[in-house]
Structures are given as C-alpha cells and as structure tokens.
Amino acid sequence: MNFALSMPRFWRRLVATTLFAALLICFYALSGKTSPRDDSTEIPVAQSPPLPFDLVVVERDMNGLPLNPKWGAQVTNPGTFPNPLDYQKCPNYDFTGPQCSSPSQIKWVNKATYNAPICVWGQAGPHRKNGHVNWAAATYTGSICWAGPSMDGDYDWSLKPDDNAGLTLENAPRPTTPGAPKSPQYIHVEFDAEETTDAPFATPLWNMFRRYLDPVCGGAAYTCDEAKGREMVDGRRAIVTGLLGLDSEHGGYSELHPVYAMAIETKPNPADPNDDNWMVFARNWGNEGYCSGKTETLSPELTSVKIVLPEPEVTNGEITGVDITSNFDSLDTNDCPTAVFIKGKGVVLSFSTPTVNSPTVPIRRPLIEGEVHLRWHSTGTIHWKPVVPCEPQLKQEFLQDQRELERSLIGRVLKVKERFAYFEIQREQQRDLFNTAAMKHCSALSGPLNIMNLDKSDVSTVMVSPPPPEQGTSKALPKKKGGRRVPTKLELMRTAIRRATRKSIH
C-alpha cells in the first residue's frame, strides 16, 4: 500500500500544505535578486582598458556619487555606444563576463517576481532576464524632456545627458525604419508617482505641473494641458540622481530608476537674466517599478542628499553672490534643506535623508519637495543656455509603449473613455488603500546666501540654516487600510481596468 495514501487525511493535508509553502518560498527566492545585495556607492575601478559595460568614473558630485559616468565602450572608442544585444561579448544574462564587464562592477539584478506577465513584451532576447541590472547610484546633468504618466503609476522622462554620458545603443530614440542606424540620445528616467507626486506634492510649481500633465485631470489621451506643462520643463536644464542600471527586459537601455533627487530649471526670465527658478525633490529610497522585486534604497551612510544648482554663464565678469527665496514641504520638518553659495560652482542645497528602518509603503520619510527662486548678482552679463528641443519621436515611443502595456494586460488597446476611467479609478484606489500622508510646509529660505570658495571641501559645516519649522504635530505614516493585505500593483491595475471597462459601457 502507498504510504502517503495510508496517512490520515489531516496529515496528508499538512504535508501537502508544507510542500506547497516550501515550493512557493523557493519560487520567490529564485525569482528575486540573483546576486548579493550591495548598496555601497563605491564603484570598483574598471580594468585598463575598460570593458564595454564597465562604468568609468572620472568625476564625483558633492554626495560622492559618480557624476556623468560613461560606459567603457564610450571611453575606449569615443562616439560609440555599448551594445546590450551583443551576445558574443555579453552572453550572461546579468552582463557579467570577461569581455563584458569587470568583476564586482555590477551590484545586483532586480528581477520581476509576481508581475512577470507584464514584463515580457520588451525587445530582450532569451539571454536576458526580465528586470533591472544595477550598477550604483549616480548623478547626470543635461536637458530634460517629459514623456508622460504611465499606466503603471510611474512618471516617465527622458534626460539628454551632457556629452552623451551613460548611453547604450538601445537608448531612445528608436529608429523609425527597420535596420536604420541607431542614434541614442536620452537616458530613460522614472519614479513612482505613488511615492512622490501623489504624496501630494503641494508647492505651487509641482502642483501646477501635475495639474497640466496628470491624467486624472481628464487627460485620457495622456494630456491635460500638455503644451503648458511641456513649456515648464521640456529642454530645460536638469540634474537627476538615481539608481543607474540597464532595463534588461526592454532591450538593455540605460535608465535612472528610481530617481532619488531631481532639479529642473523652469522658465528662466528672458527679460531679466538674473532671475532663475528650479523645482526639486529629494529622498534616498524608491522602487524600480513593476519589472523588479524589491524596494531599493541608497546606502545607509548617505544620510543627506546634495543638489548643486549651477551658476549661469557670465561674460566680462563673474557671479559674485545670490539671493534665495524658497518654498519646501516635507514628511518630516527635520529633513528641510539648507543652502550655501560656492563661487565658481553654484548653490548647494543639502537635504537630510536619514535611513528609516521598517518603512511603510508607499510613502515614508524622507521625502522633501519644493521650489527655489534665485537672484544672481554678477559683475558682467548673464547668458542662459538656450532650450534644447526635445526629439518629437519621444512622445510617440511613449504612447507606443503604453499601448503595448495595455495589450499585455487585457489583450487590446483601451478606448479613450476606458483609459480616463482607469486613471480615475486607479487614483481612487491609491487614496483609499494607502491613506496618503499630507506633506507639511517646513522651510522658506530667504535672503542672501553665505559664500564659500571652491578650495574648501566640507560644505556641510557652512550651510545656512532655515527658519524654525512651523509648530505642529508630525504627520503619521500611512498604514494598511483596515489591517488587510496591501494588493500588488499588478492586482490594482487589473482591478482598475476591469472597473474601467465596465464603467465605460454604462
């Protein structure tokens, strides 16, 4: 007689349940990260000459992070880009190998887990895994372009990096003709709206930007007042700090995802070139979206994030000082920024971003957002860099990707009415589920900034302290609604789509 069949029913059920739980644990363990987690900001030195996917660091920002690092292929052969689809040099799914990247350059692979069904529509071949291959946090400077609010809840952007730093052959724009030469120009940039702009960001500039471009305002075709929204940001100077990696399931383009800090110059006043304005946010954590396994954070030792707002160009003179007027909100008033002016460099904003244990999802400290108005003083004539036109094809590529996402979820493209209902319902779900905490006004730096020379390295000791924060109790972190399990993003999306398609019929 079969021993298993001779067991009492209770014990058979217990054994079956135990085996199922063990298999489930193994599945998630194998489908998550495949290499040891390493959050350190240090990048091992690439061999000489560097390999195609070695990250070559020549300069660092004031956080100690790589500033505009390039790939090895860009250094050994200027004007070229590494090819993520070159399976001869890079046969391993994680871009390791003696012809691909130097040992320990790649920190970890963050693969899709429960959300795998929507992470298979990219261009990656069988050699690649669905997920993100990560190097380290880095800062890039350049000009920014708005892509759009994605169905997965992310805000998508494109950054045209200075000197083409960090681009692979698969970065946007894609050739419109099959077989045509590729001409990459933009690093892909993403951050989760649930974690940031839906906090909600309430300072005037961010609030205006969201009103113009958030789909809930009625933009079922991914536009509310797109012209005005794009006028604020498209082609403007930007500084973006984020986790640098390759989006493996979509061919291997480089991206900054999540974004930890961002500053975008908005509408310099052409009638008064001494005026300057920036919208910014800062944190040290964030998720990598659907096609990943875990929420990633910067290294615990990075307890502050610094953003350098650069000096404008001056002819027949120099910048001698600057006045600041600012407005910031934060989840915790202890995280409010301080500022100092460094001659020859610019205004350094410093945000407190302490590591928080056992974080609450999706909003948690630290998170600071706001705007900075600068009034530069100079002995010469200030010249602002002209706006860099955004490649028109970027918008079409974003819309094409969104349609692919819709097909992967429901097998067809949503109708405009359905799409509007989807965004509306998705926002309702987020508000109901996460009980999003309100940001609190915390800082209003005003007046002339202290001046510091470039030859002094310790910026933190001379930061200008902001006025005392407004009195009041700290906002509580969000909790699970009624103690029930928080659904996955994929579950929320599918629920929203089902409700949207039913709603559009009536």
Image (cartoon, rainbow, N blue to C red):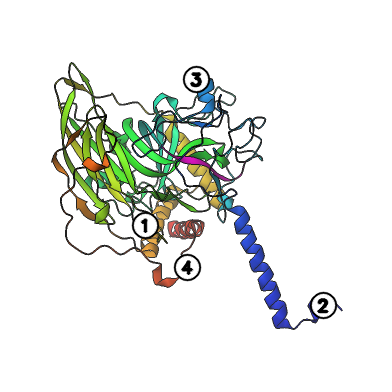
Label 1 vs label 2: CA separation? Answer: 52 Å
User: Would you name the residue on which mark 3 appears?
Assistant: 79
> Which badge, 1 or 2, is on the more N-terminal residue?
2
Percent x, y of residue 42: 46, 40
| Camera-side mark, 4 or 3 | 3
Of callouts 2 and 3, the N-terminal one: 2
Q: On the image, numbered disc 2 is attached to which residue?
A: 3
**Can you say which quadrant of the picture contains the C terminus?**
bottom left
Residue 62 picture location, percent across and down: 33, 37
Q: Using residue 412 as the reference point, say whether residue 376 is left or right of it.
A: left
Residue at (63, 33) in percent of width and height? 90
Label located before the other in sequence (4 or 3) = 3
Distance from disc 1 to disc 3, alpha carbons, whole Å, reads: 41 Å
Q: Are marks 1 and 2 in contact (CB under 8 Å)?
A: no
Front of the two marks 4 and 1: 1
Question: Disc 4 marks which residue?
Answer: 485
Q: Is residue 301 left or right of residue 103?
A: left
Kind of residue at badge 4: Arg
Residue 327 appears in the figure: yes
| Image x and y of residue 150, in percent | 43, 46
Above or below for 345 versus 111: above
First of labels 1, 3 by sequence position: 3
Is any part of residue 211 visible from this angle? Answer: no
Residue 134 falls within the magenta-colored stretch: yes
Q: In the rendered structure, find residue 363 and report the number of the disc placed on it.
A: 1
The amino acid type found where label 1 is placed reads Ile
Residue at the location (34% across, 35% down)? 239
Question: Callout 4: 10 Å neighbours few (<14), some, many (20+)?
Answer: few
Identify the magenta region.
128-138
Residue 134 shown left or right of residue 229 in the figure: right
Residue in the foreground of this view, choosing between 28 and 60: 60
